[in-house]
Image: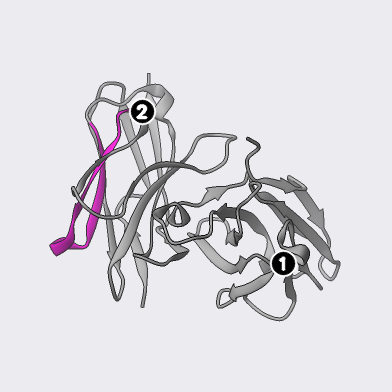
């Protein structure tokens, strides 16, 4: 079974440019999460999809960040325009949806390292 | 406010030494507890988890953790570390019976000298 995949693995962009990160969850996982780790800090939650619906977007830092999950499969996270403080590693995670404890366990992708110069 | 605190940022041990990494949380309600590990160049992997029941949980690679509710703690232990345990370790919580977003600690970098 394939794990969570993310693309690209690295991205270097200039301030003011746009970047789109992609996450492909494990097949059959309806829960999809985005997290971010800024250097030296803890991993922080950004938002949570259940299928194509945004369940919780309380962690999104501002309106320069736009996440989508059309069709309930893969998700994209767009940053437009990028600022220096957006640099960090962006992780995606997925989990099963349902009533059992399986939904509590999240499987993480390798992350996308974003550098804004 | 919900938060997780890991006591050590960087721990250096020699092989065969015992390991204990501290984790305390502040959360308004019952929680699920996790330890994740990130080996160099790899993605985050689940080491062990606690949902309910026996507060002493065993994970992969000889790791265990004990949930002490009265202390809001979930410390990670291993009796004898190996060089291959060199990694960053993250404690995390989410809401019991609902799951959802994980709240992470700052991470502890473990370096094991051969």
* In this rendering, the label closer to the viewer, 2 or 1: 2
Residue name at image x 66 percent, y 50 percent? A25
Image mark for residue A84: 1
Q: Secondary structure at mark 1?
A: helix
Residue name at image x 41 percent, y 67 percent? B98
In the image, which residues are magenta?
A: B61-78
Image location (x, y in percent) of residue A15: 81, 67
Residue name at image x 36 percent, y 78 percent? B1
Q: Nearer the viewer, residue A25 or A109?
A: A25
Q: Looking at the image, do the residues carrying marks 2 and 1 touch, with CB atoms under 8 Å apart?
A: no
Q: Give the residue pinned by disc 2.
A: B61
Tell me how far mark 2 sits from mark 1, CA to CA.
39 Å
* Rendering quarter of residue A73: bottom right
Image location (x, y in percent) of residue A37: 57, 58
Which chain does tag 2 point to? B
Image location (x, y in percent) of residue B114: 37, 18
Name the outermost residue toward the bottom: A63
Secondary structure mostly seen in the magenta stretch? strand
Number of numbered markers: 2
* Disc 2 packing (10 Å; few <14; some 14–19; many ≥20): few
């Amino acid at each position: 079974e394939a794990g969570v995949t993310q693309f690209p693995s690295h991205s270097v962009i200039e301030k003011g440019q746009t970047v789109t990160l992609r996450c492909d969850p494990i097949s059959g996982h309806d829960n999809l999460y985005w997290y971010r780790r800024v250097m030296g800090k803890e991993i922080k939650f950004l938002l949570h999809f259940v299928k194509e619906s945004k369940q919780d977007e309380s962690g999104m830092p501002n309106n320069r960040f736009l996440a989508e999950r059309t069709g309930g499969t893969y998700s994209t996270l767009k940053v437009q325009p990028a600022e220096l403080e957006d640099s960090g590693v962006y992780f995606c995670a997925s989990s099963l949806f349902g009533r059992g404890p399986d939904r509590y366990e999240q499987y993480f992708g390798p992350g996308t390292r974003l550098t804004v110069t | 406010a919900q938060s997780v605190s890991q006591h050590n940022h960087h721990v250096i041990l020699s092989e065969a030494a015992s390991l204990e990494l501290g984790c305390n949380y502040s959360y308004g309600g019952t929680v699920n507890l996790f330890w994740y590990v990130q080996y160099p160049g790899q993605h985050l992997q689940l080491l062990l988890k606690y949902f309910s029941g026996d507060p002493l949980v065993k994970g992969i690679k000889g790791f265990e953790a004990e949930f002490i509710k009265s202390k809001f703690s979930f410390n990670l232990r291993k009796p004898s570390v190996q060089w291959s345990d060199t990694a960053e370790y993250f404690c995390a919580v989410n809401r019991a019976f609902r799951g959802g977003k994980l709240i992470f600690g700052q991470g502890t970098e473990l370096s094991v000298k051969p």
